[in-house]
Amino acid sequence: MASCANSVKYSMVYNEFKLDGDYSINTFDPPFYLTPQYWKAKVEGYMSQDNAVYIATRSKVIGTNKR
């Protein structure tokens, strides 16, 4: 049933496709400007995540080595 629905969907799209049609991307999103403050906060967030994972992993590795 799913393959039949998939075939119907792509058949409809294929029939409506025009080679000379205008398929440009219209976006209404505002432009994103990367600022030094944003980048610094992003890097600090990644570093804190890395440290938290390292501490958790390190404690598990040390705990298993003591057995």
Image: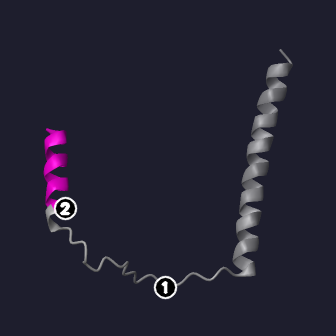
Q: Which mark is residue 51?
A: none
Q: Mark 1 and mark 2: span between their CA atoms?
A: 30 Å
Q: Name the residue under label 1.
A: 30
- Snapshot colouring: one colour
Q: Quadrant of residue 10?
A: bottom left
- The vertical placement of 62 against 13, above or below, is above
Residue displayed at 18% across by 40% down: 3
Residue displayed at 86% across by 19% down: 66
Dot 2, how many residues are within 10 Å of its Cα: few (below 14), some (14-19), or many (20+)? Answer: few
Quarter of the image with the N terminus is top left
Amino acid type, residue under disc 1 in the picture: Pro
Q: Which of marks 1 and 2 is nearer the N terminus?
A: 2
Along the line of sight, the residue nearer the viewer: 43 or 51: 43
Amino acid type, residue under disc 2 in the picture: Val
Contact? badges 1 and 2 (CB < 8 Å): no
Along the line of sight, the residue nearer the viewer: 16 or 41: 16
Q: Position of residue 42 (x, y in %)?
A: 70, 67
Q: Position of residue 38 (x, y in %)?
A: 69, 76
Q: Is mark 1 on a helix, strand or loop?
A: loop
Q: Quadrant of residue 33?
A: bottom right
For the magenta stretch, what is the residue range? 1-14
Kindly report which numbered mark, 1 or 2, lies closer to the viewer in this rendering: 2
Q: Name the residue under label 2.
A: 13
Query: What is the chief secondary structure element of the magenta stretch?
Result: helix
Q: Position of residue 57 (x, y in %)?
A: 76, 36
Dot 1, how many residues are within 10 Å of its Cα: few (below 14), some (14-19), or many (20+)? Answer: few
**Left or right placement of residue 66 versus residue 34 in this view:** right
Residue displayed at 76% across by 56% down: 48
